[in-house]
Image (tube, rainbow, N blue to C red):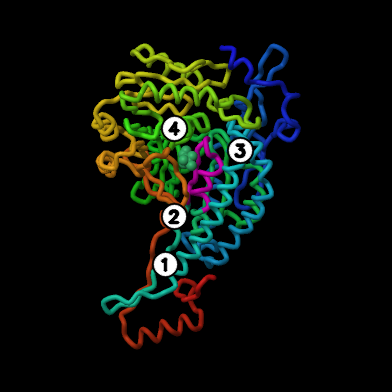
Amino acid sequence: MGTLTNTIFISAESIPEKFRISQPIEQREYLINGEMKIWSGNLNPVLSPVFLRHGSEFKQEIIGSTPLLTSTESLEALEAATNAYDLGKGVWPTMSVIQRIEHVENFLTAMRVKRDEVVTLLMWEIGKTLRDSEREFDRTCDYIVETIKAYKELDRNSAKFVDEQGFMAQIRRVPLGVSLCMGPYNYPLNETFTTLIPALIMGNTVVFKPAKYGVLLIRPLLDAFAKSFPAGVINIIYGRGRETVGALMETGKVDVFAFIGTNKGANELKRLHPKPHRLKAILGLDAKNPAIVLPDADLDNAVSECIAGSLSFNGQRCTALKILFVHESIVEEFIARFNYRVSQLKAGMPWEEGVSLTPLPEPGKVEYLKGLVEDATAHGARVVNENGGEYQHTFFYPAVLYPVNAKMRLYSEEQFGPVVPIVPFTSDDEPIDYVVNSNFGQQVSIFGTDSKRLARIMDAFVNQVGRINLNTQSQRGPDTFPFNGRKDSAEGTLSIADALRVFSIRTLVSIKNTEANKQILSTIIRNRESAFLSTDYIL
Ligand code: G3H
């Protein structure tokens, strides 16, 4: 433990009143078939990454507990979702678009009221800073608003008939069935909702299991879910993954598997489904996005972007820059400036003004990061920043490692934390080969000013990753941009519009273009005899 980390954790009295959790939240509620059930069985304690100082001692805060449901309850949730879908005949999948939108709007209104509660829990459960927690909440609300807009647009485009080679057809998007939605602990609200909301709005029914950490923060929204949707449309379960979710996949009744997490976890769960061809998977998985800093890069910009890219939320973003390739001609200068910027980052509790380095929520994470640093130093790297790798309990001060090479675990392993490996390179082919041979293929960031050189490197990556960022860090947003990845990094593409597509399939009604058939079509439309076949235009 170093002197710097010794001041991170504070006493309970030093926490501003409005961010305190007065007493542990014992959650026993879970939502099945529109009914808020109360669990009387075992509970799972929720440990905060925040330790509190009690005199000279430090104690990890237990901020509450959540139900440890078993496969019995989780299968009940699936049954509710299956019944609500009713083989596509249910009220929800057959409801008009405008009505489904109304339900989602009602949910959003009820959700907005819970902002403060959710934001406080985000800070306590996963250690996300106040600013970023607020951003996560607001971004999620915006995502819902934009999803509604995109759905209206989609519906408007489907209102017209296609006239092709003697056929007339109306093509619309319809739901796929029962979705299982699971999100990650680093964006337990936002990323979960980027699948959950599109799944619902398109008419699917859902079983939703909150992330490993960042679980209690869904509780303030349970009531809004219960009141905003018909019974069985959204079911929310808690418990250990293998026991609860594994049982669901084994039934073969899950039609869509939306999962943001590790590729190992996704593979294990997917494998349990007895009819893989009937399962549509939408996955956001591991990544090891590199930054490549060329000799002519604007160093101030490159350093700023690499700081944000590698250390926002302590490096716990799937899109984080997880390895920096810096040209050897500028690497010393880059490291000097980078280290200075690291030293300016404020460490502390998530609610503190201007803080950016905070404790880590995963148990064992500090030991894991220490292991990565030890392995790198054993193979010839040094921690080159002051205080780098100091730790206390759940807090780990960023360690900048240099020079990193292929023998080290940090070269290929996704650290998902505040350790920054820097690799010097001489030929542009070195980082290109790294990406080509990597198991991951999410994004890459290139920093430079020579257009010819940038273009060559960029072109080398277009068939390797989902997004190439020029002179900027890797990131998911704007949420209208396609977000995907290759290899072990993802399956399917998400964006506001793409998510509506991945949770639906196109169905069409087609006729041969005869007068008699056209008459039938006109009658159906004029008399509003069909919910599907209609030229109604949502404003
Ligand atoms: O953890 C992965 C997130 O989708 C990253 O999103 O780039 O907006 O932080 P972000």
Q: In this view, does 1 lie above or below 201?
A: above
Q: Earlier in the sequence, mark 1 or mark 4?
A: 1
* Place of residue 328 in the rendered image (x, y in percent of width and height, measured from the top left): 31, 23
Q: In this view, does 485 lie above or below 203?
A: above
Q: Which amino acid does label 2 sit on?
A: Phe
Q: Residue 172 carries which label?
A: 1
> Which residue corresponds to the image point at 36% horizontal and 11% vertical from the top-left?
378
Of 525 and 37, nearer the camera is 525
**Apparent side of residue 51 relative to residue 443 in the rendered image (left or right):** right
Q: Earlier in the sequence, mark 2 or mark 1?
A: 1
Q: In which quarter of the image is the N terminus?
A: top right
Label 3 and label 1: CA atoms lie apart by: 40 Å
Nearest to viewer (mark 1 / mark 4)? 4
Q: Which amino acid does label 1 sit on?
A: Arg
> Which residue corresponds to the image point at 49% horizontal and 79% vertical from the top-left?
529
Question: Any atom of ligand 1 within 8 Å of the CB at mark 3?
Answer: no
Label 1 and label 4: CA atoms lie apart by: 49 Å
**Apparent side of residue 421 relative to residue 238 in the rendered image (left or right):** left
Which residue has dot 2 on it? 503
Q: In this view, does 397 lie above or below 510?
A: above
Label 3 and label 4: CA atoms lie apart by: 24 Å
Which residue has dot 4 on it? 300
**Apparent side of residue 156 relative to residue 141 in the rendered image (left or right):** left
* Place of residue 191 in the rendered image (x, y in percent of width and height, measured from the top left): 50, 43
Circles 1 and 4 in contact, beta carbons < 8 Å? no
Q: Which of marks 3 and 4 is nearer the N terminus?
A: 3
Label 4 and label 2: CA atoms lie apart by: 42 Å
Q: Which amino acid does label 4 sit on?
A: Asp
Q: Which mark is residue 151?
A: none
Which residue has dot 3 on it? 131
Q: Does residue 180 show up magenta in the picture?
A: yes
